[in-house]
Amino acid sequence: MKIISIIIYLILTVGGLVLVKSGAETTSLAIQNGTFNFSMQLKVMLGFIAYVGSFLIYTFYIIKKFDLSYIYPIITGITQVLVVIAGILLFKEKLNIYGIVGIILIILGVIFLNIK
């Protein structure tokens, strides 16, 4: 159950960020003539829901089942790498040599944290 909770957390976190970014262009927030206007696409709402779901899993399950000094760097590193991969594949973002070196360092850090 521990590993499943981490996988669900990662899917919800990365999925939420991808959904929010994909619908962010049409999201608007304005105050006109004393009226507050806010609109967003369904994708953005689903992204927020997914991200809140990941926060709840992290807060009420993962922190209780793992040592924080161990699990936080690992899931943060994996999340960062997955977000970069999603940005490249889905949004055609470019990655330079510094990004590649950074990803390699993150992966090495996760590996070193798992050496017992």
Image: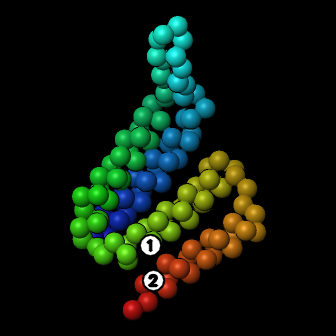
Identify the residue shown where x is 24% and y is 71%: 65
Identify the residue shown where x is 40% and y is 52%: 12
Residue furthest to the right in view is: 97
Q: Position of residue 7 (x, y in %)?
A: 37, 64
- What mark, if any, has residue 74 been given in the picture? 1
Quadrant, the N terminus: bottom left
Q: Is residue 54 visible?
A: yes
Identify the residue shown where x is 56% and y is 81%: 108
The answer to which of 88 and 30 lies nearer the viewer is 30
Q: Given contact means CB atoms under 8 Å apart, are the residues at marks 1 and 2 in contact? A: yes
Residue furthest to the front in view is: 34
Residue type for callout 2: Leu
Pointer 1 or 2: first along the chain = 1
Residue type for callout 1: Ile
Residue furthest to the bottom in view is: 116
What is the crowding at mark 1: few (fewer than 14 residues within 10 Å), some, or many (at least 20)? many
**Colour scheme of the rendered structure:** rainbow
Task: Determine whether 72 is above or below 95 in the image.
Answer: below
| Element under disc 1 | helix
Residue designated by label 2: 113
Q: Position of residue 32 (x, y in %)?
A: 54, 11
In the image, is 69 to the left or to the right of 105? left
Q: Position of residue 79 (x, y in %)?
A: 49, 62
Q: Is residue 1 visible?
A: no
Task: Determine whether 25 is above or below 55 in the image.
Answer: above
| Element under disc 2 | helix
Q: Position of residue 18 (x, y in %)?
A: 52, 47
Identify the residue shown where x is 49% and y is 85%: 112
Spatial separation of the CA atoms under disc 1 and disc 2: 7 Å
